[in-house]
Image: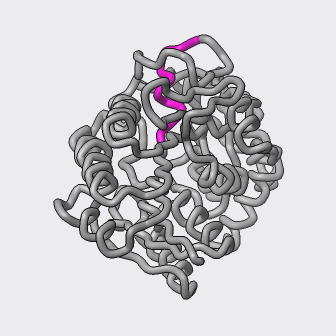
């Protein structure tokens, strides 16, 4: 029997690829996306148009936080699984427009949890971020580490959604898995992400801005590895039996799972890989660290491996070459 998945943020970068992966696996997918203007809406519309070519896909263009929207959607479609990816993203934008994060991340997630309480799915999978680790200097980051010192309002709202979700999992026995994503990249990515901005600038002959004078590391995750992990976790429902290194709550069917490469890449090596893929050198402008940013991220992917038998594997050079090839084709440069 065909199962139904609700994917919020279905026209976003991760939402698009997750929806495609679910459709290819035989799921019916209900998308929800407001096509916000945080970045180029044309890119979101193009992704949505490609999804609409699939017979098993349908979409509602509305905001998470609109009262009644999610409740009506759950009542009508009774999704078997929920993959909640819609959110206001961006560390730097959260300094300029914090209310956007309250509405989309906090109120939007509340509306989702209320709808799930009324019409419980078999499993809910909600996106968090590596940014919740904040000022933690113990690396690699493990899901069981204390995460109480977020460095940006964006990260604070995402940690709040983890806490909100745990309370609903406990009170209403809703099986919930939270993902902590580590710098996801790849074709059709977000224009505000570093790989997109660097590629655009290098191919245009413009300078790139390098913060903390290049002394930074990131655990990058290629989009195909991420969606494979999400699909593997859908049927790994949070329950009563923990595995080794588990983050499973002792009072709720709730766990947190890192999705990252477990292999941090120095920023200058990342830039060098983009330069190689573009076939030209970047003009570099160096700056101090930006407010809200952190010098390094590093995922411990042991729990993901123990739960699913897999972990991200795509080398950064391969992933960036794929992205640059897509960028050249899409923008005809």
Q: Residue at x 63, y 47 (%)?
A: 236
In the image, 163 versus 214, the foreground residue is: 163
Question: Residue 266 at x, y = what percent?
Answer: 72, 28
Quadrant of res 150:
top left
Above or below, comparing residue 14 to residue 147 in the picture: below
Classify the position of the C terminus by image quarter.
bottom right
Q: Residue at x 41, y 17 (%)?
A: 148
Extreme residue in the top direction: 138
Above or below, comparing residue 198 to residue 333 in the picture: above
- Residue 290 relative to residue 260: left or right: left
Boundaries of the magenta span: 128-137
Question: Residue 86 at x, y = what percent?
Answer: 40, 55
Residue 204 drawn in magenta: no
Extreme residue in the left direction: 67
Question: Residue 251 at x, y = what percent?
Answer: 43, 26
- Residue 15 relative to residue 69: left or right: right
Residue 129 drawn in magenta: yes
- Regarding residue 82, the answer to whether it shows in the image is yes
Q: Residue at x 47, y 39 (%)?
A: 128
- Regarding residue 214, the answer to whether it shows in the image is no
In the image, 180 versus 183, the foreground residue is: 180
Number of disc labels = 0
Question: Residue 194 at x, y = what percent?
Answer: 58, 44
């Amino acid at each position: 029997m065909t199962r139904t998945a609700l994917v919020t943020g279905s026209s976003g970068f991760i939402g698009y690829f997750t929806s495609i992966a679910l459709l290819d696996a035989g799921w019916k997918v209900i998308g929800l996306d407001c096509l916000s203007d945080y970045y180029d809406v044309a890119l979101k519309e193009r992704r949505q148009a490609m999804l609409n070519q699939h017979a098993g896909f349908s979409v509602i263009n509305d905001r998470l936080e609109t009262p009644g929207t999610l409740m009506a959607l759950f009542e009508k479609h009774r999704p078997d699984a929920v993959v909640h990816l819609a959110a206001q993203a961006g560390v730097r934008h959260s300094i300029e427009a914090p209310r956007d994060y309250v509405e989309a991340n906090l109120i939007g997630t509340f509306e989702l949890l209320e709808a799930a309480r009324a019409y419980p799915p078999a499993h809910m999978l909600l996106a968090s971020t590596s940014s919740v680790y904040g000022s933690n200097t113990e690396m690699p980051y493990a899901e069981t580490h204390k995460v109480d010192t977020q460095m940006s309002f964006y990260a604070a709202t995402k940690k709040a959604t983890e806490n909100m979700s745990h309370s609903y999992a406990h009170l209403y026995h809703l099986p919930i898995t939270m993902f902590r994503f580590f710098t996801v990249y790849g074709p059709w990515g977000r224009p505000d992400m570093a790989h997109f901005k660097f590629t655009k600038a290098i191919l245009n002959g413009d300078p790139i801005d390098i913060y903390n004078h290049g002394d930074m590391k990131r655990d990058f995750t290629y989009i195909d590895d991420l969606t494979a992990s999400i699909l593997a976790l859908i049927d790994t429902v949070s329950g009563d039996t923990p595995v080794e290194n588990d983050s499973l709550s002792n009072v709720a069917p709730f766990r947190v799972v890192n999705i990252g490469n477990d292999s941090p890449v120095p920023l200058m090596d990342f830039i060098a890989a983009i330069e190689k893929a573009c076939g030209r050198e970047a003009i570099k402008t160096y700056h101090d660290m930006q407010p809200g940013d952190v010098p390094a991220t590093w995922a411990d992917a042991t729990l993901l491996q123990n739960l699913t038998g897999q972990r991200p594997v795509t080398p950064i050079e391969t992933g960036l070459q794929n992205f640059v090839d897509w960028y050249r084709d899409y923008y005809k440069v």
